[in-house]
Image: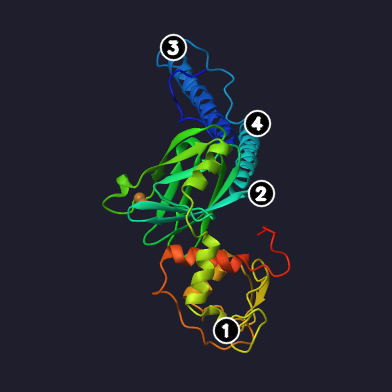
Amino acid sequence: MWSFPLLPENASTLAGEVDALFYFLVGISIFFSLLIIGGLIFSAVRYREGSKATREGAKDDYLPVELLWSGIPFLIAIGIFTWAAKVFVDMRVPPKNAMEVYVVGKQWMWKIQHPQGNKEINELHVPVGKPVKLIMTSQDVIHSFYVPAFRIKQDVLPGRYSTQWFEATKTGEYHLFCAEYCGTSHSAMIGKVVVLEQDEYEEWLANRASDVKMLGSGEQLFKQFGCQTCHRQVSGQRGPSLEGLFGKQVRLANGETVTADLDYIRESILNPSTKLVAGYQHLMPTYRNQLNPDQINELVEYVRSLRGEDPSATGR
Ligand code: CUA
């Protein structure tokens, strides 16, 4: 339909929704611009100085028109808001069955880690037609994960996780950019998303598979740092059990309640005293300087996997 590419390639399930809204906004802007400019030119010509056009019957106010030009834009604006809110929610809420990939932004590269252990830099391999959820954090400053063909852009922040999801609709390679100025080589912080057929993807996974899966590395770190000394299967005196912790409500020493999500687990590894669990003393040291972001992700992934009686559940 368009020989002039107004937008980047459309390669995700979200792209159509975003484009439709975008085209509507552009269309309605053009419509009202033409209406207003047209009226302006018409009046300027017709009522120019010396014109014989009649000026009789001019009104200072006319209620029906005033109601109309307030009411119609109001309805249009509310309509746009409702529509855009729906698109926003669709973009923010990943499907339950989404596969997960960890992303770490750092000056100036994208580090990707698949749960199977595969690591890649400035490349992200995914299967076509499958929702993918990115769990992202930064090692230094704010970056932004931007794939125009998927119509996704999400800030990647130090000290917390942000998430983004997409489902690619066709195979191919798509540009990946950093869309937040992050220093000297910001413009070089680019890469590509490679969308493969399911079987090709599985082959890629198998060929590039690491000896140790993310969970395995996490478990190794858990032992290496002696976490199980205090966090045993059953809550002891020194620390609470982590079995089945993920997603639960946790009562804190200060009386507040928090949900044990990714950010909570991460924070508790780095700043254990910030959200002390009720009934426990502040014994745990910080692991801030002993773990790199990849290792933190691996540990978080491991703690998350300790689901007690139901190891297959993936709800979050
Ligand atoms: Cu990272 Cu700009």
The disc label shown at residue 248, or none: none
Q: Amino acid at mark 3?
A: Ser
Q: Nearer the viewer, mark 1 or mark 2?
A: 1
Query: Crowdedness of circle 4 by 10 Å Cα count: few (<14), some, many (20+)?
Result: few
Q: CA distance from mark 4 to mark 2?
A: 47 Å
Q: In the image shown, does 206 or 117 lie closer to the viewer? A: 206
Q: CA distance from mark 4 to mark 1?
A: 69 Å
Kind of element beneath mark 4: helix
Q: Position of residue 301 (x, y in %)?
A: 56, 63
Single out the mark in the foreground, 4 or 2: 2
Identity, as a three-letter code, of the amino acid under mark 1: Cys
Say which amino acid is labelled 4: Leu
Q: Give the structural element (helix, strand or loop) at label 3.
A: loop
- Which numbered disc, 3 or 4, marks the residue closer to the eye? 4
* Residue 240, quarter of the rendered image: bottom right
The label on residue 51 is 3
Quadrant where the C terminus sits is bottom right
Q: From the viewer's perspective, is 70 left or right of 147?
A: right
**What percent of the width, then of the height, locates residue 83?**
63, 39
What secondary structure is marked by label 2? Answer: loop
What separation in Å lies between label 3 and label 4 (alpha carbons)? 30 Å
Question: Given this view, does label 1 or label 3 mark the residue nearer the observer?
Answer: 1
Give the labeled residue for mark 2. 97
Q: Nearer the viewer, residue 44 or 242?
A: 242
The residue carrying mark 1 is 230
Compared with 31, 282 (above or below) is below
Callout 2 amino acid: Asn
